[in-house]
Amino acid sequence: MAVTEDKHKNIEALEEATIRFAGDSGDGMQLTGGQFTNATAIVGNDLSTLPDYPAEIRAPAGSLAGVSGFQIHFSSKEIYTPGDILDVLVAMNPAALKANLKDLKPGGMLIVNTNAFNETNLKKVNYTSNPLEDAALQSKYKVFGIEISRLTQLALEGSSLSAKHVDRTKNLFALGLMCWLYTRPMEKTIEWLNQKFKDKPDILDANLKVLKAGYHFGETTEVFISSYKIDQAKIKPGKYRNITGNEATVLGLIAASKKAGITPLLGSYPITPASDILHELAKYKQFGFRTFQAEDEIAAIGVALGASFAGGLGITTTSGPGVCLKSEFINLAIKTELPLVICDIQRGGPSTGLPTKTEQSDLLQAMFGRNGDSPIPIVSASTPGDCFEAVFEAVRIAIKYMTPVFFLSDGYIANGSEPWEIPDANKLPNIEVKFRKEKEGFSSYLRDEKTLARPWAIPGTPGLEHVLTGIETEVTTGKINYDPANHDAMVKIRAKKIENIENDIPDIKPVFGGEKGDLLILGWGSTYGSICAATELLIASGHKVANAHLRYLNPFPKNLGAFLKNYKKVLIPEINMGQMNMLIRAKYLVDSQGLNIVAGKPLKVNSITEAAESLLK
Amino acid sequence: MATLEQPKYTKADFESANDVRWCPGCGDYAILSAVQSVMPTLGIPKEKFVFVSGIGCSSRFPHYMNCYGFHTIHGRALTVASGVKSINPDLSVWVVTGDGDGLSIGGNHTMHAIRRNQDLKILLFNNKIYGLTKGQYSPTSELGKKTKSTPMGSIDNPINPVSLAIASGATFVARTIDKNVKHMMEIFKEAAAHKGTAFIEIYQNCLIFNDNAFVDYTEKEVKDDHSVYLTSGKPLVYGKESDKAIKLNGFSAQSTGAKNGDLKNALIHDPTVKDKALAYVLGQMGVENPELPVAFGVLRKVEEPTYQDRLLDQEKQALSKKPNASIEDILNAGDTWVVS
Ligand code: SF4
């Protein structure tokens, strides 16, 4: 279908927009958002997305608990976040309206499926009257009531599909309409539908009809005075694709294992929001990627550690509750000094908490959540695309230093997406693996002088037979040893080995702002986007503010202590109760202040600017 | 596997220099010695053996073998062993566990390693007690057992290790006993030759905390009336005078007289029967119905693809469909666009 811009009555240019599609979890909102995102990526806008779905697989239809949303912020400028506040809300039913209206900006566009605003649906969410008839709503927002369900039925009049199947296609009407409204091409969606329903011609036909009906509705009716366009963003030249954090993690793990030239084995147990990594990696058997869905979280890390002992790259993926179960094995990996990558895709806690919502509250668990003194490197990702590089680094450190490494991501960047510049595979650094072969002078804990790594001698190598154990062992021979002085020495060696990694990671420097100033906003992980956007605003309004973002959380960059002292004040925004702040204060005796909002959502830009401004007063 | 150039090993090659620290007289010594004696006969290069254990008296085992070993954490040996074997299927991986390690804290992994037919040799030392923590009842301790943690007697029903293994689909299940070194060695050899999970329950006497738990099967006067040794293709005959036999009556085993060589009704042992029911009946004898003798020997031995066979097979299939997959391809997959 050729969609040309001249069919648009009147096109208004905008710099950016934030749209949220919201409906029942059965309404296909994630799919709609995903397709709109692809179309937006093709246009060349910078973009950032935030899927938000319920924890229940099928909460009762029409209930608040069942509302699923997908937010996209796109722009002709560089952007960092999925947006604090909505320009457009597409609400497919009363529950979606009720759950999301508070995020729509005054004067924003509210597009609703009026057919869903019947008595039953209104009752389900305790609306005593139809909110669309409320004069206050009408005056506060630009309300567009559209009979999406009925128009979908009309588009499919005479179709052989059941009424239920017909109704299921209504999300495509909304997608078609939004593509018209924001002048997005639909070719990719059409291609995708062709592929997906190639064996079901009647469903394919219905989907295409409804998608086009939505588009034509915008074009031919007088409901919208104009449509909008958002020019291509000036992004760094290169080849791009849209990517979620979990997808980037998968690619990073595959690339790193290829660069290391050893067989990777992922041991995993399904858990939200990490399961997608298991699903994706299971598709790459042609790369020799072995995936093992274990009977529980403990077995999952156990097989990964066994794999590493045998000379593979052991990886385990999980979320906070899974880390609780794995902690004994993480300690065995620390004690036996084997490489292992533990990917923790954080979610709301404690306990089961908020499985589908984001949080940064596993930092101290990763850092300290084990018995004994058990130092472990921690690497974190700051954006969806950054997961690639961060997890690659985790693999590099694990192998080079013979240690388990935590890779921290979270629900927001795991499921959120952004355009990602595809790296040149040839330019990725090699990861050197040194399996010990020589019998002469072998001792299982005789360390490399520089890295303090012990040799990796794998079963099958003649003459290097040795036994690893969780019991304390002698400093070089690796034989069981209960001597107090030996234990003291081993505890200190283990600490030193991890501390030493600070010599092998880049210094911290400001992302925005100068090397000195009144305020430093220090972040880590998924708060990157909000902090960058806030810092830009603060600088633009004349403040001497800078921001810096930590990738390496243990050890910290070597210059961090001195760097912090270049600023009069330090603000640390986190989606937890101040875990990084505690580490920074303890280590550097800096009077840093926290901004802590633990609502299961990314931090808003204006929460950060407000906190910064009050510190700058 | 054996080739001409292969070094000839002796038992001593498998003995580590570490002092063995089990209590003097512990049944573990005999098991260790039997394993060390069998290793040189298997035609496998020494560096390809890996011994993985959990926590408990038995789990010290790897330290006493001069082989690759991993003494892991409580109950989890099978998970580590599964990982080792899945990275390098060429290794001969042996797991040493106990009734507490393998059936209590690690019970879940026992079931799952077995159902996957992981190509592992599992030696479960059953002494019906917790030894390392000094004498609490274990999941195989009998009902009413008085221990430090059950002063009035245990109120837990015990589990029969071979029943669990058979129910989980173990392709090789055997039972042997520390006092019968020759039998242990035969069973270990047969297990080593089996492809897939080989589960071996070894009755092991803990003389410190549960002495004489197995005297019925070791004391000269009584052992023949309480044990029946299984041989494939042979009738199940036992008794001091070989005067008793086991016959089947529906789903139960029964003892019957076998006077004057009358073996008309005696069950002929066939461990290769696919149906698990027969092995299950044999495994229960003497344990869950004490009037019958305990069966020693191979209860079940069937051939099925191992986990590693299936793993490598899928890998081959995937590779034949996408033979030249490169990192470039996957990095550049999906919708891409160029910004110039
Ligand atoms: S406590 Fe029992 S099982 Fe443990 S070493 Fe001593 S005798 Fe053997």
Image (tube, rainbow, N blue to C red):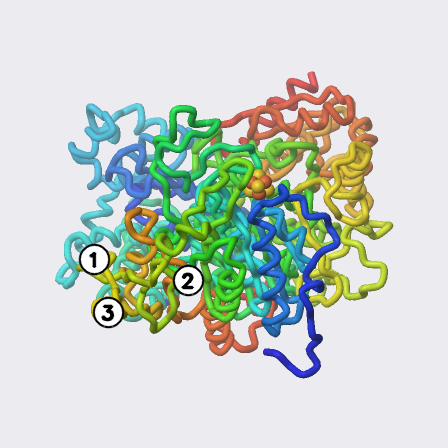
**Marked residue nearer the N-terminal end (2 or 1):** 1
Direction from residue A49 to residue B285 in the image, left or right: left
Which mark's residue is nearer the viewer, 2 or 3? 3
**Residue flagged by tag 1: what amino acid is it?**
Phe
Residue B4 % position (x, y): 67, 83
The residue at 21%/40% (across/down) is A116
Q: Which residue is mark 3?
A: B262
Q: Say whether disc 2 or disc 3 marks the residue closer to the N-terminus.
A: 3
Q: Which label sits on residue A541? A: none
Query: In the image, which disc is placed on residue B297?
Result: 2
**B54 vs A129: above or below:** below
Provide the secondary structure element on which disc 2 rests.
strand
The residue depicted at 20 percent of the width and 25 percent of the height is A129
Local crowd size for mark 1, using a 10 Å CA cut-off: few (<14), some (14–19), many (≥20): few
Look at the image and tell me in which quarter the N terminus of chain A lies: bottom left
Apparent side of residue A292 relative to residue B70 in the rendered image (left or right):
left
Instruction: Kindly report the distance in space between the C-alpha atoms of the residues bearing marks 1 and 3.
Output: 22 Å
> Would you say residue A509 is visible in this rendering?
no
* Residue B251: numbered disc: 1
Q: SS of the residue at dot 3?
A: loop
Inspect this view and state whether residue B162 appears: yes
A610 on left or right of A592: left
